[in-house]
Amino acid sequence: MSQEFDKCLRLGKLKEFAPGPKLVSKELRSAKDDLEVSLKSFTEKNYKWSIIQAYYSIFHSARALIYSEGYREKSHFCLIEGVRTLFVEKGKLSVLLVEALLEAKNLREAADYYGDFSEINCNKLTKKAGEFLKIAKEIT
């Protein structure tokens, strides 16, 4: 286990969560719904909203993954560390998907807090959200 994962556990930002596996399907449904809204917003050229929803699609897919392992996050950073430790380090998930989660977080923050967004980044992010969801469904 990584030092960052251990730190998240010590700080209570990542906790064991027995009900987690029962909530996986709910998180995957949320991820699917957010992706659908994101794609609709993209076709309407509402790129800011599409980026935000694509991020939350990836967020819910990632949450489904850690729930499946009996953990719950209390921060976006620790969600990322949870996915990295529980899935990438064990060879269950490509590091590229963790990088997609990080990029999605950064693009969402730029769009939401600074009004910085583009069609190109939006298109890229909606595709990554779809890939992340597909793989999360396969793994869980």
Image: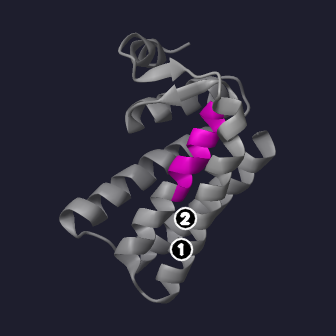
Give the labeled residue for mark 2: 34
Residue farthest toward the right in the current orientation of the protein: 138
Image quadrant holding the N terminus, namely top right
Q: Nearer the viewer, residue 127 or 60?
A: 60
Separation (CA) of disc 2 from disc 1: 5 Å
Q: Nearer the viewer, residue 95 or 10?
A: 10
Where residue 46 appears, as percent x and y from the top left, is 39, 82
Q: Residue at x 21, y 60 (%)?
A: 113
Image height of 54 relative to 10, above or below:
below
Identify the magenta region: 57-67
Q: Residue at x 60, y 57 (%)?
A: 31
Q: Is residue 130 left or right of residue 115?
A: right
Q: Residues within 10 Å of mark 2 (few under 14, many from 20)?
A: many
Amino acid type shown at disc 1: Val
Dominant SS of magenta comes to helix
Q: Residue at x 27, y 63 (%)?
A: 112
Image height of 23 relative to 38, above or below:
above
Where residue 70 appears, as percent x and y from the top left, is 65, 24
Q: Residues within 10 Å of mark 1 (few under 14, many from 20)?
A: some
Image quadrant holding the C terminus, namely top right
Give the quarter of the image for residue 51.
Answer: bottom left
The answer to the question of whether label 2 and label 1 lie on touching residues, with beta carbons closer than 8 A, is yes
Residue farthest toward the bottom in the current orientation of the protein: 44
Q: Is disc 1 placed on a helix, strand or loop? A: helix
Amino acid type shown at disc 2: Asp
Image height of 121 relative to 128, above or below:
below
- Please give the count of numbered marks on the rendered protein: 2
**Which numbered tag is attached to residue 37?**
1
Q: Is residue 131 left or right of residue 83?
A: right
Q: Nearer the viewer, residue 101 or 61?
A: 61
Q: Is residue 99 visible?
A: yes
